[in-house]
Amino acid sequence: MFNLEGQPSAPDFSFPWKRNLLVTMLAFVAAFVVMSLIGVVCAVLQPQLSNLMSDPMLFGSIFQFASYVVTFAGTILFLRAWLPRDRGFGEMVSGGFSLLRTQFARALGAGAIGYLVSVISVLLIYTLLPLPSPQSPAGDFGKTLTGASFIWFALTAVVAAPILEELLFRGLMQNMLRGAFRVSFIGRRSLIGADVVALVITSALFALAHGTLTGFPPLFITGLLLGE
């Protein structure tokens, strides 16, 4: 795309976050504090409420689903409070779904290719570098479940996690960083550079939020591909 002067024009970008980097990073720090506090409250409540059901595994699975939804939904609503009031919340988080709505086959193909690239990249990294094997406490917990307990765990891992994590990290955080970097010194030099920096930071935050250092490399790579 080119403007009337024949120069390359900026890619379409309507996200309204135009705050400076300091405000943006303070919002993120505050959001992670809120996320941590909600998580701590849920962890404290779980043993106190464990006698509500006779099946402790089923209770644990249901409680994990509920606490996950409350934690991420609470963080999303907290960040929503920082956003301008004159723009709809749907606009803030719907950018990544536009391709899915209009070109489902293309979106499906991009997802399949991204997953393949992620798997190959992770295998290469762990083959070439002396890194410890990634640990997944949630996955280990899921292997011990059966019946209704496993169904609730699956709802957390396959439904709640993808939707809420995408809304938070790719919907809000990446777009907030894009907006902040585009009006900073980085954006004045290169809009693409601003978007890349936002992508890298968001992917790192996404990986760190999972609380596993051994799993950071695959989560970071996955975050890059999802953000792209």
Image: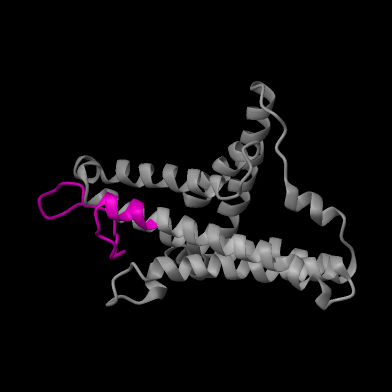
Determine the image quadrant of residue 51.
Answer: bottom right
Q: In this view, does 38 lie above or below 185?
A: below
- Say whether residue 68 is left or right of residue 101: right
Q: Residue 22, image x and y in percent?
A: 28, 50
Q: Is the magenta stretch mostly helix, strand or loop?
A: loop
Counting the numbered discs, the total is 0
Residue displayed at 74% across by 70% down: 48
Whether residue 155 is visible, yes or no, is: no
> Which is nearer the eye, 35 or 206?
35
- Say whether residue 210 is left or right of residue 3: right
Whether residue 6 is visible, yes or no, is: yes
Residue displayed at 79% across by 66% down: 60
Determine the image quadrant of residue 123.
Answer: top right
- Say whether residue 190 is left or right of residue 77: left
Q: Residue 222, image x and y in percent?
A: 57, 45
Q: Is residue 15 magenta?
A: yes
Q: In this view, does 170 lie above or below 91?
A: above
Q: Is residue 180 magenta?
A: no
Determine the image quadrant of residue 108.
Answer: bottom right
Q: Residue 92, image x and y in percent?
A: 38, 68
Q: Residue 128, image x and y in percent?
A: 65, 22
Residue segment shown in magenta: 1-27
- Rendering colour mode: one colour
